[in-house]
Image (cartoon, rainbow, N blue to C red):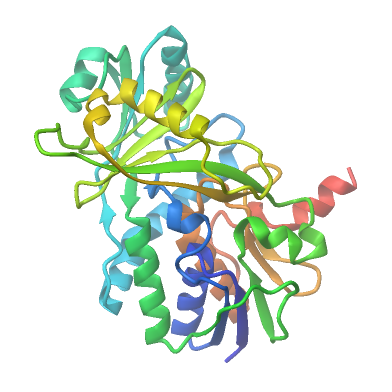
Amino acid sequence: MTNLAVVGGGVIGLSAAWCAAKAGHDVTVHDPEPARGGASWLAGGMLAPVTEAWPGEEDVLSLGEASLKRWPGFASDLAQEGVAPGLAAHGTLVVAFDSADAGHLDILAGYLHSIGRAAERLTGRETKRLEPGAGSVRSGLHVPGDLAVDNRKLLDALYAACVNHDVRFVRERVETPPDAEAVVLAAGAWTGRLHPQLAGAVRPLKGEILRLKPRRGCLPPPTRTVRAVVEGRPIYLVPRGDQELVLGATQYEAGFDRAVTARGVRELLEGAERVFPAITEYELVETAAGLRAASRDVLPYIGVLDDGVFAATGHHRNGLLMAPVTAAAVVAWLEGEPPPEGVEAASPARLHQKEHV
């Protein structure tokens, strides 16, 4: 049994803590607001490695797909702990509105086809048939294998599972790695401040997100995740089981600023109206801004740093998606076993390699 300190109580930290405690290790989580603060509480909940894929990011796709395969079992195990995380298998629909959007979709569809991933190209009429509430779309791309999860139910489930396995919580922010036999750094955008090897390698990437609900007489939310690029800005709408709709997300460099801006809200609502016109009559129930942990190259840092501390950070848009494989990597490290498939490429050792090139 190893005495493990996990810094960070978001989805990555709690997943690592739960899996490590379940494997028989003595675990303490250090976070001022476990399961509530940070980007995990504000995430859209998409588990969509295929629609996030882009040429040149093959390692990210491989790691995301390896983690997606683990998600059904991960969610089932969590539900057996007492709280279901709200996993949904409704797929993703990517829509295009003009020739520029359609060109972007052509590149994505061609790339996915070239690497053998399932994705169905749709005409505008076929897209509307699949999702009648969509706006005046030119074409679409249906990815049936994508999943989604209710991020807040997931955090509640992880917290309850940790409590079930006697994980301790120290509700304070730490400035340096705690004194323990093993340490996992999973503090999201703040991780770069905790270790010299990660200084400058992890940065905050701001994203605003809205939550809406249909009022009486409104068209219900889409039946699946709908994504688009509107005037060069990515946008997504993720339905929740309680008729709530999550709308996100702006993405820009703003340091550690977490203020919701009028510009960000306007951009999201204007983009959403084009994607799903009925949203203009929805009730706006929440506006918030979170800080994603961005790495230098989109791929996260999962692995051992020089002094034996384990990095689990820099997941960018894919923290929820990659939680199962990241947690499995932490347990493999504690057990002295090889990391799971796809994790080796995410080793923080690549930071040193680039420095010496």
Viewer-nearest residue: 183 or 328: 183
Q: Residue 224 at what x, y percent from top left?
A: 25, 38
Residue that lies at the very extreme toward the bottom in this rendered image: 1
Viewer-nearest residue: 303 or 275: 275
Which residue is found at the position 48% from the left and 85% from the top? Answer: 167
Q: Residue 23 at what x, y percent from top left?
A: 47, 83
Which residue is found at the position 67% from the left and 59% from the top? Answer: 190
Say left or right for 72 vs 339. left
Q: Is residue 61 above or below residue 181?
A: above
Q: Residue 11 at what x, y percent from top left?
A: 47, 63
Which residue is found at the position 76% from the left and 58% from the top? Answer: 198
Q: How many marks?
A: 0
Residue that lies at the very extreme toward the front in this rendered image: 262
Q: Quadrant of residue 36?
A: bottom left
Q: Residue 342 at what x, y percent from top left?
A: 56, 54
Location of the N terminus by quadrant is bottom right
Residue that lies at the very extreme toward the left in this rendered image: 217
Location of the C terminus by quadrant is top right
Q: Is residue 341 above or below residue 334?
A: above
Q: In this view, does 118 lie above or below 321?
A: above
Residue that lies at the very extreme toward the top in this rendered image: 99
Q: In this view, does 166 lie above or below 258?
A: below
Say left or right for 4 vs 137. right
Which residue is found at the position 37% from the left and 78% from the top? Answer: 161
